[in-house]
Image (cartoon, grey):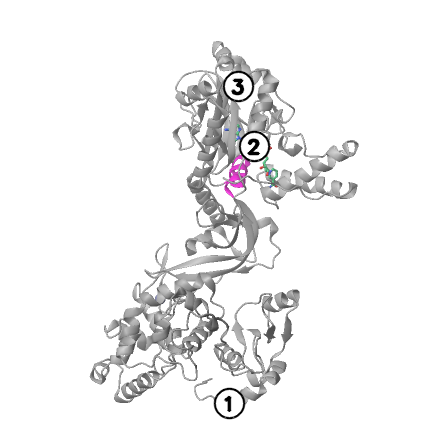
Amino acid sequence: MGAMTTTPAAVADASAYARAVEEARTAAAAYYAGGESAVDDDTYDRLVRGIAAYEKEHPDETLADSPTGKVAGGAATGDVPHSAPMLSLDNVFSAEQLVAWAASLERRLGRPVEAWSVEPKLDGLAIAARYEHGRLTRLVTRGDGTAGEDVSHAVGSVVGLPGRLTEPVSLEVRGEVLMTREQFERGNALRTEHGGAPFANARGAAAGTLRAKDRPYRAETTFYGYGALPLPSSGPLGELLERWPHSQVLEYVTGLGVHTAAATDVAPRTLATVAEVQSRVEEIAGLRAELPFGIDGIVIKADLAEDQRAAGAGSRAPRWAIAYKLPAVEKITRLLAVEWNVGRTGVVAPRAVLEPVLIDGSTVTYATLHNPGDITRRDLRLGDRVMVHKAGDIIPRVEAPVVRLRTGEERPIVFPEDCPQCGGEIDTSGQRWRCVRGRDCRLVASISYAVGRDQLDIEGLGATRVVQLVEAGLLTDFADLFVLRREQLLALDRMGVTSTDNLLAAVEGAKAQPLSRVLAALGVRGTGRSMSRRIARHFATMDRLRAADAEAVRRVDGIGTEKAPLIVAELAELAPLIDKLVAAGVNMTEPGATPPPDGAEGGPEAADAPEVALPGGPLAGMTVVVTGAMTGPLAKLSRNRMNELIERAGGTSSSSVSKRTTLLVAGENAGTKRAKAEALGVRVADPDEFAAMVAELLTDDQGDPDDRP
Ligand SMILES: NC(=O)c1ccc[n+]([C@@H]2O[C@H](COP(=O)([O-])OP(=O)(O)OC[C@H]3O[C@@H](n4cnc5c(N)ncnc54)[C@H](O)[C@@H]3O)[C@@H](O)[C@H]2O)c1
Ligand SMILES: [Zn+2]
């Protein structure tokens, strides 16, 4: 478990300080009101730490509105006085800080702490539940710590807070009200069905739900008790509650039928040493991702009542307890796009493309959206600021939009009408959408791709025809095309003599395609068309390529140490298909390419040998990226043709702009790539300038016979 550091926000002078205080106050007010804060917890905590740092330097400038040293940052209030203050907790962020805190508590007590209680820090809101003679009479929020708000109207919708205890006793149970993951999903669905805006996360949803009075629907929350105190009506029980160790109080409360964390994987434990505390802290942290409810840390308490009494409390927090905070797992970022991917079994699943955001040490760019219904239930829109959740190894997910940050510029998310992989129909009757072709979808898509104009370029093989051939059992992969017999085709519906002969001729012609296109047709993972060309030019023949090990493959420009072994493995996996193609007489050489001398693939000379055909070409040594729509003499060239052109001119084509890019050809509507190139100081040329640079090669390219419009 990595230590977490929260860098304070920079607060440079008095006016920045005043602004920071105002910003924190607004955020906390929204947060505790159960509406939505405009900032995530990390951002808020950094702000408060910046404020605290400034106040330490300038103690007499402290503003009355400052959130420091106050329960709920001073942003919550209430009119129901608490019998005893409901405080917040102080924080530690690392094992070292925890050890130091424990030592300072023991110094204060003048004796070792005899027993520690270690329990989850439930991420909801604190509530006091008053029971008189076994009946639940009142629910009060924490408020400012001295008085809270009466939310008794919520009785009945809070799971785990029974209306009647198993014994007719009087006491106040304190604990956390939260929404489990499931309750949050259901609650948000209910809310959007009733025309309401979704809550951004489970915590906000629990707070909002608890405080809302006149809702036509009821969303459920869950209570977890973590303490109990006497009421005036408690009688002799009151004295016991004040004398029992914390762990015994919890046991008693559980026995009365109140929900506590006792039955969960992260149940409170009583431990003797700080070392044991530390390992339990790590255990709970490790379980975080799998819990059905959110935790934002671990709470460590001195278990014995006399230790607690002797330690006492400050204005904001007790001195006998501490919260070991875990890194935030939720951050706000922007939803840029929704992609639709088709799985092996034909499930069409949406995936969110996000503005990259750092969560718990890793950058998140994609997040799951589960199924199309999820998008509707969450009322997501493109351009929305969304709360993204990522914990441990689980796949990041979009929780919900942060509705109060909407600008009005958000656009609806477009759902696909046809299968994005094979173009077939989508069955939208279930929760999960499926391509009606199921497992055939991938086959149809991979064959359609292989015969496409940038790969084997077989005319007359549109998607419908491919489907027909697959369904007739004639194709199990694209190599089967080369052994199709005339009578098999003639036996099919809608296959006349002319179409059959044309198709057979096109297939025959495809056998002569260069190796680069065969490689592209194979769809080797991690290699696009441009990489296929570089590989083909480097090795010149399929035999040499198949004989190459990772070390030799790595020498192809742009492959690198990570990709090379994957390509080797992928080629080994494709061996049966490649053999089938060879047996069918498909060409396996790259015309014009000079292979490295035999036995030298792995030699040092090979490393420097340019595999590009034109070492002296106009783009020699340049790495070129193309973006936007081409115009002028380049208007007719597909992106693949452009890349071929760049490589024939001695350059290397690439799809993304980096520091290594030497030239960006930016056509109309060039977007982020242009901005990035400009930011990196990469030279940018428009299509006409570029056409002039490669004019000598352009004349033959335009006449390219297979360049169909
Ligand atoms: N995003 C925002 O705008 C915004 C604004 C204000 C506060 N916040 C967040 O709220 C947090 C601070 O809030 P806080 O002052 O309510 O304190 P806190 O939530 O950090 O800690 C105190 C609370 O922990 C809870 N708790 C959970 N499990 C417990 C257990 N087992 N035993 C005892 N208490 C337990 C109690 O409700 C207690 O009041 C910070 O994480 C901050 O980021 C965010
Ligand atoms: Zn499909």
Q: Is residue 595 left or right of residue 12?
A: left
- Amino acid at dot 1: Asp
User: x, y percentage for residue 299?
Assistant: 52, 29
For the residues marked 1 and 3, what is the alpha-carbon distance in whole angstroms?
Answer: 86 Å
Location of mark 1 (residue): 700
Q: Is residue 359 left or right of residue 681?
A: left
349 w.r.t. 172: above or below: below
The mark nearer the N terminus, 2 or 1, is: 2
Q: Secondary structure at mark 3?
A: loop
- Residue at coordinates 29% horizontally, 89% vertically from top-left? 498
- Amino acid at dot 2: Glu
478 w.r.t. 290: above or below: below
User: x, y percentage for residue 119?
Assistant: 47, 29
Dot in front, 2 or 3: 2
Q: Residues within 10 Å of mark 2 (few under 14, many from 20)?
A: few
For the residues marked 2 and 3, what is the alpha-carbon distance in whole angstroms?
Answer: 18 Å
User: x, y percentage for residue 626?
Assistant: 56, 74
The mark nearer the N terminus, 2 or 3, is: 2
- Amino acid at dot 3: Val
The mark nearer the N terminus, 1 or 3, is: 3
Q: Residues within 10 Å of mark 3 (few under 14, many from 20)?
A: many
Magenta residues (range): 200-215
Magenta region, main secondary structure: helix
User: x, y percentage for residue 232?
Assistant: 54, 13
- Residue at coordinates 53% horizontally, 19% vertically from top-left? 113
Location of mark 2 (residue): 96
- As drawn, the label of residue 113 is 3
Residue 612: in sight, yes or no? yes
Instruction: Tell me which image quadrant ligand 2 sits in.
Output: bottom left
Magenta run includes residue 441: no
Q: Residues within 10 Å of mark 1 (few under 14, many from 20)?
A: few
134 w.r.t. 266: above or below: above
